Image: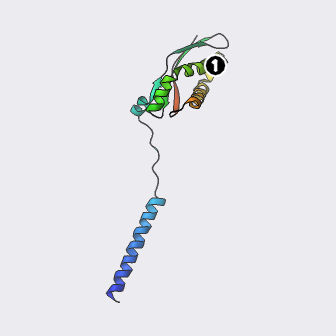
Amino acid sequence: MNAKVIIIILSVVIIVGGGGYVAWSFFLSPTTEAKEPTATELAENSVATDEITTDLEDGSIVRIQFQLITDGEKAKEEVTARQFQLKNIVIKEMTTMNKEDFQAGLTDLEENLKKELNEEMQEGKIEDVYTISKVLQ
């Protein structure tokens, strides 16, 4: 065989092999999943509400406080400015609850609060709502 033919064949094999590897690594390699935020990142993007005191439908008194996790600094600033709307939403939600509803439906309250506040948000969004303090009398 001619030396030129051998060089051409080896070049084609190297190019096809390299292209195959690049295609495999791009299309078939496992993708990295989104990493969970660290505790420090959560703290940097969170806002603790003031304590909210209101009554339930059955006359019970509730004092509650939330920690809102936002998706960034602008959302955090907006949530801080919208605390009055947050209080309004909580009061409206709780006036339709009785003691049993409140004790069993805290997760629903957090989800409703998140949903309704996100409808008002213009800069970013609320990722999660945690109840950090509650007293039922």
User: Which residue: 65% across, 10% down?
Assistant: 59
Percent coordinates x, y for residue 118 in the rendering: 56, 31
Q: How is the image coloured?
A: rainbow
Numbered marks: total: 1
Nearer to the camera, 4 or 100:
4
- Judging by the rendered image, the residue that carries numbered circle 1 is 92
Percent coordinates x, y for residue 94 in the rendering: 63, 18
User: Which residue: 63% across, 19% down?
Assistant: 92
User: Which residue: 46% across, 52% down?
Assistant: 31
Label 1 secondary element: helix
Placement of the C terminus among the 4 image quadrants: top right
Nearer to the camera, 100 or 116:
116
Residues packed near mark 1 inside 10 Å, few (<14), some (14 to 19) or many (20 plus): few
Quick one: which residue is furthest to the front in this view? 122
Query: In which quadrant of the rendered view does residue 113 lie?
Result: top right
Q: Where 62 sits versus 9, above or below?
A: above
Percent coordinates x, y for residue 91 in the rendering: 61, 17
Which residue type does callout 1 highlight? Lys
Placement of the N terminus among the 4 image quadrants: bottom left
Percent coordinates x, y for residue 121 in the rendering: 54, 30
Query: In which quadrant of the rendered view does residue 2 lie?
Result: bottom left
Nearer to the camera, 77 or 10:
77
Q: In this rendering, would 81 be left or right of 111?
A: left
Quick one: which residue is furthest to the left in this view? 3
